[in-house]
Amino acid sequence: MSALATTLQAFFTDRLVRQRQVSPNTVQAYRDTLRLLLIFASEQHGKAPGKLDIDDLDAPLIGAFLDHLEHERQNGVRTRNARLAAIRSLFRYAALRHPEHAATIERVLAIPPKHFERRLVTWLTEAEIDALLAAPDRATWTGRRDAALFGLAVQTGLRASELIGLTCVDVHLGAGAHVSCNGKGRKQRITPLTSGTVAVMRVWLAERAGQPADPLYPTRTGRALSRDALERRLAGYVKDAASRCPSLARKRVTMHVLRHSAAMRLLRAGIDTAVIALWLGHEQVETTQIYLHADLQIKERALERTAPITTKPGRFRPTDKLLAFLEAL
């Protein structure tokens, strides 16, 4: 086997799984990236993927591969940068095992991510949330399940993967009601529940009547919902809710939009961004700043507290003593 083949195998089994203990989602994302890269390099060099060496994956080829992702596979800049991050992770690992290829590895690691214009986040207003949560048919089992699921999503801001990974034992409805989940990077997170959510979850758990390790939101066959199924059901409810709340028809609503909506609720309630970052499971507080940029009302309130530009500076003059006495009463 070539040096690249042995390094690639060790990268997954040793670096990702044993040393970093990354989540299965991360393993799959890296696997898909490197599989695409090997297929592309094999076509460029006319070699079987197993016979490619590290020097075959030089900086010009990696650059051509990234262009191929954007122009031929129609990947966005975010996806391109995520693919590049996976490649750089492999090459950083290869640098420790194969210093003889240091020149090639160094040039690949020097490839910068591509800059992109960050769009403002989309979130739902209270009226839109109410219309969405009223869309599931409570007369059916799936409707009651979906009402409990999306209600929990809007209140807690859990990611889609976190929601479908919940089990019955993860919901605690006693004193200090909360839901616990294994979040991104296998980090356990606890999110408190409001009284309204507690009431909904208590009814759903009684109907669910599952074992502690069973999925909290199962399909009719008892398996956990898939991410695609979750997005499809949400899209259907948004379409139904748009008839009652027309503004929903102008928004592209995904599970991540429900997560944004939970964050904006907290922000407008005056919760500090550091607390919101902990609530959402953000690795860095800076990630939460996108909500400050998106909320126009916060900016308007800040503007109201500033003095007009035309205001002339002057000294403070106290009011008349008699008037000051009356105003202090």
Image (cartoon, rainbow, N blue to C red):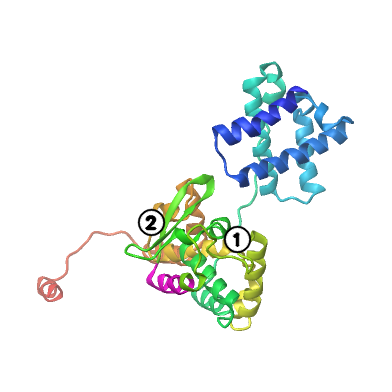
Q: Amino acid at mark 1?
A: Ala
Q: Main secondary structure of the magenta part?
A: helix
Q: Is residue 329 magenta?
A: no
Q: Is residue 202 magenta?
A: yes
Q: Is residue 291 visible?
A: yes
- Toward the viewer: 220 or 5? 220
Check disc 1 and report the residue beneath it: 224
Considering the numbered disc 2 on the image, is that residue within a helix, a strand or a loop?
loop
In the displayed structure, would residue 115 be above or below residue 12?
below
Q: Which mark is residue 190?
A: none
Displayed quadrant of residue 109: top right
Task: Give, as a three-letter code, the residue at label 2.
Answer: Asp
Q: Can the viewer see residue 89 in this picture?
A: no
Q: Quadrant of residue 170?
A: bottom left
Q: Residue furthest right?
A: 46
In the displayed structure, would residue 275 be above or below residue 82? Answer: below
Query: Quick one: label 2, few (<14), some, or many (20+) residues within 10 Å?
Result: few
Residue linked to disc 2: 272
Q: Give the x, y percent position of residue 297.
A: 46, 67
Of residue 305 and residue 197, the one placed in the foreground of this image is 197
Quadrant placement of the C terminus: bottom left
Classed neighbour count for the residue bearing mark 1: other residues with Cα under 10 Å, few (<14), some (14–19), many (≥20): some
Distance Cα–Cα, label 1 vs label 2:
34 Å
Percent across and percent down for residue 30 are 67, 40
Q: Earlier in the sequence, mark 1 or mark 2?
A: 1
What residue lies at 49% left-to-right and 58% top-to-bottom? 291
Quadrant of the rendered image containing residue 55: top right
Q: Are marks 1 and 2 in contact (CB under 8 Å)?
A: no
- Tell me which segment is drawn in magenta: 194-204
